[in-house]
Each structure stands twice: as structure tokens, then as C-alpha cells.
Image (tube, grey):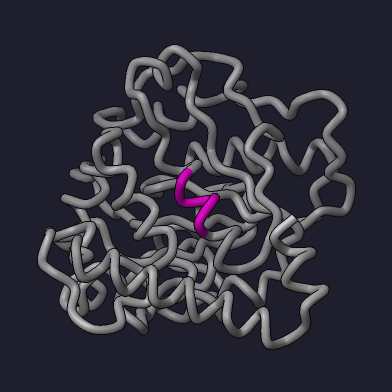
Amino acid sequence: MLDSLIENNGPTARLVYHLRRRVAAAGVDLLYPPRCACCDSELMGNHDELLLCTDCCRSLGPETRPCCPFCGAAGAVDGVPPERCWLCRKTRLKFDKVVPLGDYHVAELHDVVLRMKRPVHESLSAAMGRLLARRRRQQLAELRPDLIVPVPMYWTRRLDRGTNSPEILARELGRTLGIAVRRRVLWRCRNTLPQAGLPPGQRFQNVRGAFRVRSGRRLRGARVLLVDDILTTGATCSEAAKVLKKAGAAMVAVAVVARAQGPNTT
């Protein structure tokens, strides 16, 4: 109704409408100054709806991050062969590329990933999704995804935890990039042990057969962006990508907030 009234009254009505919205938003900011979703510091000036301060943006999402062009591991590129690093060369991963925001070993990002697993920090998950979309916009656009799919959580664990940060990350990526999010395409059909603490070999076995594509979902020829909060061995995303490709997806790339490396990471 409001949209039709604005449209019928022309550009002047649209201008007045947007000016009133800006004034209202400014009034809310004056009464309740926006705060950084990560460090809770007051945001000054034009916070641009990201809701992260400059310092947190810098520490959580570096603008440039040299990494393996396939698995996204930082500092792991030796050039032989150029498309794979020593971490992923001998592992048969089913996805086509990983686009990470930052490194899990960075203390600030490590803390953020753990906080995102709690419902009280859903606003932080949303802010990180927007930061991931903005910092890695070019790499994500080059993938030409048709849809975004979050890595699902088993229903009992989802009920117990109260939130699933990959769903929030996917939602914000979709909004920022203008790509459809399909939350119910993939479902976790089997409860698995937490990947944290399992040796690399057992992680792949742990998630084998844990995902299915819901019946009636059309994926033939689709380019899918799979979203998770963290990638370590790649076992979970690889299993999900295998299922999506079996259902007809032409390409499955992975976007994550943090890329972890080494035996001591979760």
C-alpha cells in the first residue's frame, strides 16, 4: 500500500519519504547511539549499517589476504602446482573453492566465531555476514552463484543451541550480494559427533552420509555458494558439496568467516 502511494505521487513523494526515514533514523541514533556488535564501543558518524567499528573491521576482516586459491589456507601457497597448496593437494575435497574472511588463529576472530554460536550474539553473526560480503565481494561475484545455502545443523542440536550462525551469515550475504538464500535445500539427516577434537581422518568419516537434499529441490546446473562459520579440514563442507553436486549442482564454492589450519584448531 505504501509503495503504491509513493509510486502514484511521483519523485517528490519518494524524496519526502526517504528524507523522513533518514530523520527518524537519526533520531533513534541520537537517543540510542549504535554500538559495535563486536567490542560494544559507540559508533561515531556514519556507521553504514555494518555495526562494526573501524578497529574491529580491520582485525576481523583484512582487506587483502594472500592464500591458497583452492582451499583458502593462508601462507600455504608454494606454487607447485599453482592451483593447490600442500594442505589440500592430497585431499579429495568435493567443493570447488573456499573464500574465507580471515584466519582462525587471530585471537579476535577466534573469539568471534565462538561467540557466534550463542543466541545472544546473533547480531554479531549478522555483522560478520555483512563484513564477509563487503570484504570478499569481488571473489564471491567471480563465482557467479545462483543461490546461497547454509550448512544445516541437526535438529536436536539446533534446538539445544538456539541458533545456527551459518543461517545468519547466509541471510546477510544474500541481502548484501542480491542472491537468493535457500535455507531448506540441504538438511542434516544424521546427528554426528562434534568435529572439534576429532583427528582429521575421523572428521571425514564422522560426516559421511550426514546430509541430504530435500526432495523436489531443483539444483540441476545451479552454482551454489555454501556458507559455514569455520573451515578446518574441509570435511563437513566437502560432504555437503558432494551431496549438492549429486543432486545436480554444477559448482559448489564455500564462504566462511574463519579458515583454520593445523592439528590444534577446532
Residue 174, x across and y down, in percent: 60, 58
Choose between 186 and 236: the one closer to the eye: 186
Residue 52, x across and y down, in percent: 26, 68
Instruction: Answer whether residue 53 is magenta in the image.
Output: no
Instruction: Answer whether residue 171 is magenta in the image.
Output: yes
Residue at the image point whose x is 61% and y is 37% from the top: 240
Residue 75 visible in the displayed image: no
Is the C terminus in the top left, top right, bottom left or bottom right quadrant? Answer: top left
How many marks the image carries: the answer is 0
Name the side, left or right, on which 210 lies relative to 47: right
Name the side, left or right, on which 96 lies relative to 131: right
Name the side, left or right, on which 176 lies relative to 14: left
Name the side, left or right, on which 265 lies relative to 159: left
Placement of 78 over or under 228, stated as above or below = below
Q: What are the residue bounds of the magenta stretch?
A: 168-172
Residue 200, x across and y down, in percent: 36, 36
Residue at the image point whose x is 53% and y is 50% from the top: 170
Placement of 100 over or under 229, stated as above or below = below
Residue at the image point whose x is 50% and y is 53% from the top: 90
Which quadrant would residue 17 be assigned to in this image?
A: bottom right
Is the N terminus in the top left, top right, bottom left or bottom right quadrant? Answer: bottom right
